[in-house]
């Protein structure tokens, strides 16, 4: 299919660019086998566009602290180098000066200018990372289950019906997002990782918890694993009677954006699709929880082919993403993305508020603006795209949706509700917070109408101590 068949789209690949290497066929095969490009490749990557020496230096500084990784598909097919630095995929993947706050930036820059040893740079970087809230919302302490006094690494169980699983081989991605809240898992610090050694714990925990209907494979990106490794985790759902209650297998991934070849040209792509089809045929729902931030990620022939092939297995693709300043802070971008998703058979699912971690000051958007973007987008699309919910904060007590700003009994308030709660009884109850135009996260909000606390706070205390 030709990208020009999308109304109103300007094809990224078709734009002439003097200094971008041309792809004769712009086809799938042209980027070959997957190969990660990292910080040490920055010099050669910068030849693609109008990257100035200053920008290049800034990238080296920022990537000393925050993880950087990309690949040729992203560089050659997703980024419009004529539009940098404003191109959304460029901002999504390439480190920008503003991602480190002034003092942190100059601290690393100074070390690099005076040729400090790599150890000196690393130790300053580790120090800065420590202050960037590497595990927001009590990720490490609160949700990791224990059995017989033993901590089950690689599992998270926060909401009754859904267990998260972090396969240890899936703790990386085909490229890294600059805003990623999982960034702490990529910087090689063992202490910061949440990962599992093997499938045994997962299968045992699920067998012991018959009320879990959903398992969500996450990472990193589980699609980075070879199909053969995924078989080891997933075949059991077909073969093991003790896992019969697990009805829905979800796989969270950004491979459709960063490496759609995973589903089309990789040597084990067909085996992966067969595995998905076998799970579907065993009577289960297989959901690919795809991550798309911008419609530009949906436009290449190969991503559209990947979507078709996944859907042919009977799996369903649902799409979710955070709202980010400098990338998709615009209702028209979301409306166009959701329309495009519906056209391709992808179901819009969640719009998230950017989490309170990493370079949040660069990406964060006030809650009121998040709601305006959501409303401005959803009013433009048909009911088929209104399956999406949000803007939603994945906070300590649960997923909290901002329903809007409203005046109630003479007080301007945020109207909120739980989409998911640590206590399922919280779900679906509207509640109110005092209006605050600057608030960007739940913990900055105060109860409205002179109340002392939110209705869930006592319950939360009881559940998390
Ligand atoms: C979002 C999330 C889930 C899944 O929630 P759904 O609303 O069912 O998609 C499960 N566990 C955690 C920790 C989550 O953040
Ligand atoms: S693909 Fe997901 S886990 Fe990987 S860097 Fe991006 S947001 Fe993080």
Image (cartoon, helix red, strand yellow):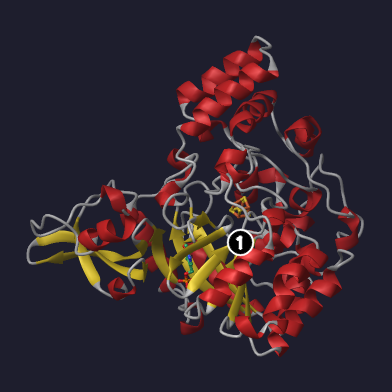
**Total marks in image:** 1
State the residue lying farthest toward the front: 148
Relative side of 280 to 41, left or right: left
Q: Nearer the viewer, residue 285 or 296?
A: 285
Looking at the image, residue 33 lies above or below residue 82 = below
Q: Position of residue 359 (x, y in %)?
A: 49, 39
Residue displayed at 46% across by 52% down: 139
Dot 1 surroundings within 10 Å: few (below 14), some, or many (20 or more)?
many
Q: Position of residue 175 (x, y in %)?
A: 70, 49
User: To which quarter of the image does residue 264 belong?
Assistant: bottom right
Relative side of 204 to 18, left or right: left
State the residue lying farthest toward the top: 114
Looking at the image, residue 259 lies above or below residue 172 = below
Relative side of 369 to 207, left or right: left
Q: Nearer the viewer, residue 185 or 44?
A: 185
Q: What residue did someone put label 1 on?
A: 218
Residue displayed at 52% across by 55% down: 151
Label 1: state its secondary structure. loop
Q: Position of residue 6 (x, y in %)?
A: 68, 72
Looking at the image, residue 62 lies above or below residue 345 = above
Residue displayed at 82% across by 39% down: 19
Residue displayed at 90% across by 55% down: 32
User: To which quarter of the image does residue 184 belong?
Assistant: top right
> Can see residue 331?
no
Looking at the image, residue 85 lies above or below residue 342 = above
Q: Nearer the viewer, residue 103 or 296?
A: 103
> Does the beta carbon of the residue at mark 1 sit less than 8 Å from ligand 2?
yes
Q: Position of residue 308 (x, y in %)?
A: 74, 78
Q: Nearer the viewer, residue 120 or 231?
A: 231
> Can see residue 146?
yes
């Amino acid at each position: 299919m030709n990208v020009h068949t999308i109304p109103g789209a300007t094809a990224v690949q078709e734009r002439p660019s003097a200094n971008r290497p041309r792809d004769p066929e712009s086809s799938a095969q042209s980027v070959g086998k997957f190969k990660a490009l990292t910080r040490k490749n920055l010099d050669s990557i910068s030849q693609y566009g109008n990257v100035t020496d200053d920008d290049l230096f800034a990238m080296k500084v920022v990537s000393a602290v925050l993880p950087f990784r990309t690949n040729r598909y992203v560089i050659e097919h997703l980024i419009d180098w004529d539009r940098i630095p404003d191109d959304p995929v460029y901002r999504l993947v390439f480190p920008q000066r503003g991602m480190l706050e002034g003092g942190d930036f100059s601290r690393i820059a100074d070390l690099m200018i005076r040729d400090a040893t790599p150890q000196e740079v690393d130790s300053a970087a580790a120090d800065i990372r420590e202050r960037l809230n590497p595990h927001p919302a009590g990720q490490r302490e609160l949700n990791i289950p224990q059995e017989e006094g033993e901590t089950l690494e690689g599992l998270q169980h926060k909401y009754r019906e859904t267990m998260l699983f972090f396969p240890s081989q899936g703790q990386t991605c085909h490229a890294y997002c600059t805003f990623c809240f999982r960034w702490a898992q990529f910087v090689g610090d063992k202490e910061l990782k949440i990962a599992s050694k093997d499938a045994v714990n997962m299968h045992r925990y699920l067998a012991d918890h018959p009320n879990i209907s959903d398992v969500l494979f996450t990472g990193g990106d589980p699609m980075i694993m070879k199909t053969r490794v995924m078989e080891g985790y997933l075949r059991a759902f077909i073969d093991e009677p003790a896992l019969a209650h697990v009805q829905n297998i979800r796989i969270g991934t950004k491979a459709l954006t960063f490496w759609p070849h995973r589903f089309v040209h990789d040597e084990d792509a067909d085996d992966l699709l067969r595995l998905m089809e076998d799970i579907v045929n065993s009577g289960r729902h297989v959901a690919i929880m795809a991550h798309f931030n911008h419609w530009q990620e949906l436009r290449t022939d190969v991503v559209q082919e990947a979507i078709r092939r996944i859907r042919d297995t009977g799996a369903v693709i649902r799409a979710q993403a955070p709202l980010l300043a400098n990338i998709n802070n615009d209702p028209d971008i979301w409306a166009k993305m959701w329309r495009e998703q519906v056209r391709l058979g992808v179901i819009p699912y969640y719009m998230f508020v950017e989490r309170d971690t990493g370079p949040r000051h660069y990406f964060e958007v006030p809650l009121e603006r998040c709601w305006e973007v959501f409303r401005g987008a959803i009013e433009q699309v048909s009911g088929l795209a209104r399956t999406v919910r949000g803007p939603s904060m994945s906070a300590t007590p649960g997923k909290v949706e901002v329903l809007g700003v409203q005046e109630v009994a003479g007080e301007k308030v945020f109207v909120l509700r739980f989409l998911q709660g640590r206590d399922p009884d919280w779900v679906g109850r509207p509640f109110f917070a005092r209006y605050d135009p600057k608030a960007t996260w739940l913990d900055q909000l105060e109860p409205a109408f002179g109340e002392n606390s939110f209705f869930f706070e006592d319950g939360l205390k009881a559940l998390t101590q």
